[in-house]
Image: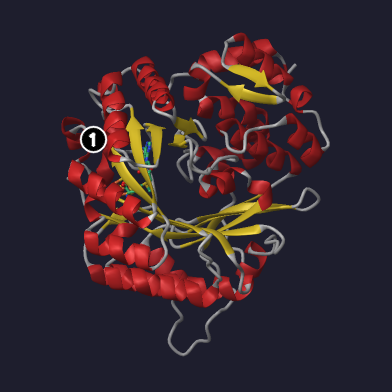
Amino acid sequence: MPLLATAEGVSQYLDRHIGREPGTKIQYGHPSPRFWQRRQPPLSEALAPVDAQRSLNFYVHIPFCPPTEPEACGFCLFAREDFRSYAHVEAYLADLYAELDRVAARLGRRTLKTLYFGGGTPNVLHEASIHEVFDRLHEKFDIPKSCETTFEGTPGLFTPGRLEALAAVGVNRISVGAQTLQSHLIAYSGRTQRHEHIQRTATFCREHGIHCSVDLITGWFEQTPADVVADIALLDDWGVDGIVNHPLTLGGDSAFARRKHELPPVEVTRDAFLGGRDALLARGFRADGYTDYCRSHLPPVQFLEMYRDVLHNDRVGIGYGANSLLSGTHAAPGHTYKNVVGREAYHARNATPAGAPADADASCIDAIFTFDAIDLRLIYVLKGLEGCPWLDATDYAREFGRDLARDFAPWWEALSARGWLAWNDGRPMLQGAGIFYTSEIQRCLSEPRNGVLRRAAGPQADMGLHADI
Ligand SMILES: C[S@@+](CC[C@H](N)C(=O)[O-])C[C@H]1O[C@@H](n2cnc3c(N)ncnc32)[C@H](O)[C@@H]1O
Ligand code: SF4
């Protein structure tokens, strides 16, 4: 009998895997990029599953970041590079516009539900570039005021001038990557940022009706549970609307991963993470997911809903390293794909050799995974365990014509026995320490499918084509 066919087997799997890494979040969701196929389909194939009946969500990747020592803030695993010269940014934007032109030509003039600028560090863009990018996007899409438009960045680069430019182009959500407010902790990342950078951004947002969300990371060197609670208290006092508390993900060859032995034990990080959650709830924040909190009078963040409700949202990303997810239908499942990483590789996909006609069907894709029906079900379940919209047996039955309790019975039984899961009104919800271990639980739920994919991929799956994060 397969290991995960019984609650006992699930429990053994959890015992073996839990706590090996502190709360490693799965960046691309299911399935891991190590099972994606490395190929470059034409855009017509890539965008074929787009359904005009579903909401369209657009992502723009800006990879540049202020250089730090250690590199990449010591912990970052995103597709990014050090900012060296604004000429590089301008050259990148020219390539980005070329990709936008081709993608938009295929999508047609659609109305965007959400628009997200991520990175890297989008707020490296100068004010004139912010206006230019938005002009280009407005040429291609309808972007109503109701479109949740998020712009990410580091605290120090949210200068008054940039904030004015972002408000002027209609950005209505700002995500500030603070990571920690403790200066002795932030020093490990080599980042230079001050409290007033975050405070002035929060104040500007409040005065302009912009939602201000701040990212924290739990699990740093020397960090205590009290440090996390102190950060939350400050952010609450400054009036931010949302707080995202990520457990530190270690991966690849990051400086933090090399110094892993100096990091707090997983149990300390777990207690700090869960203590942070308690503090947020006590201060009146609502948990919209295991890492995401929002003031309870505000509506849920649409980006989160979109990110989790993949069956009813199409997500198209442009820029290097951008990820797209088009679930297709149950009868004809779609795919997820990721663009090439690196300025030169990206340029090569967007440049037209002198004298040659432009290829309107050229994509920037590096790797793609075509879903099977089981993948759509798994994604639905894994994302639903993160929350908002929460996993719900009635929705599951309507969507898939199946029984959620029966389909994953060994997992529900094993998790309930540990006190990590409880059914509330037809919803299996993680609780207690299970919340901290969300990503490990997700991995355990997808393990039987991953086993099939590993066998199909053969040795390639072990080459680590992409970090499994
Ligand atoms: C694209 S990044 C950053 C935005 C911006 N460049 C910054 O650093 O402020 C988005 C968020 O991912 C989170 N993040 C990045 N690397 C992480 C890691 N290794 N573990 C946990 N969270 C991470 C950080 O909280 C960060 O704010
Ligand atoms: S955390 Fe932000 S600023 Fe630091 S390397 Fe990652 S994307 Fe860049």
| Image: 336 above or below 4 | below
Q: Secondary structure at mark 1?
A: loop
The residue drawn where x is 76% and y is 52% is 329
Task: Return the x and y of residue 286 as percentages of the image width and height.
Answer: 48, 32
Task: Return the x and y of residue 371 as percentages of the image width and height.
Answer: 69, 47
Horizontal side, residue 342 vs residue 87: left or right: right
The residue drawn where x is 27% and y is 63% is 162
Viewport quadrant of the N terminus: top right
In this picture the colour scheme is secondary structure
| Image: 144 above or below 105 | above
Q: Name the one closer to the observer, 280 or 422.
A: 280
Residue 422 lies in what quarter of the image? Answer: top right
Mark 1 is on which residue type? Leu
Residue 249 visible? The answer is: no
Does mark 1 have its CB less than 8 Å from ligand 1? Answer: no
The residue drawn where x is 43% and y is 75% is 135
Count of marks, rendered view: 1
Task: Return the x and y of residue 447 as percentages of the image width and height.
Answer: 62, 28
| Image: 186 above or below 208 | above
The residue drawn where x is 57% and y is 45% is 305
Task: Return the x and y of residue 75 as percentages of the image width and height.
Answer: 31, 38
Q: Name the one closer to the observer, 245 or 45.
A: 245
| Image: 122 above or below 417 | below
Residue 373 lies in what quarter of the image? Answer: top right
Label 1 environment density (alpha carbons within 10 Å; few <14, some 14–19, many ≥20): many
Residue 38 visible? The answer is: yes
Residue where numbered disc 1 is placed: 181
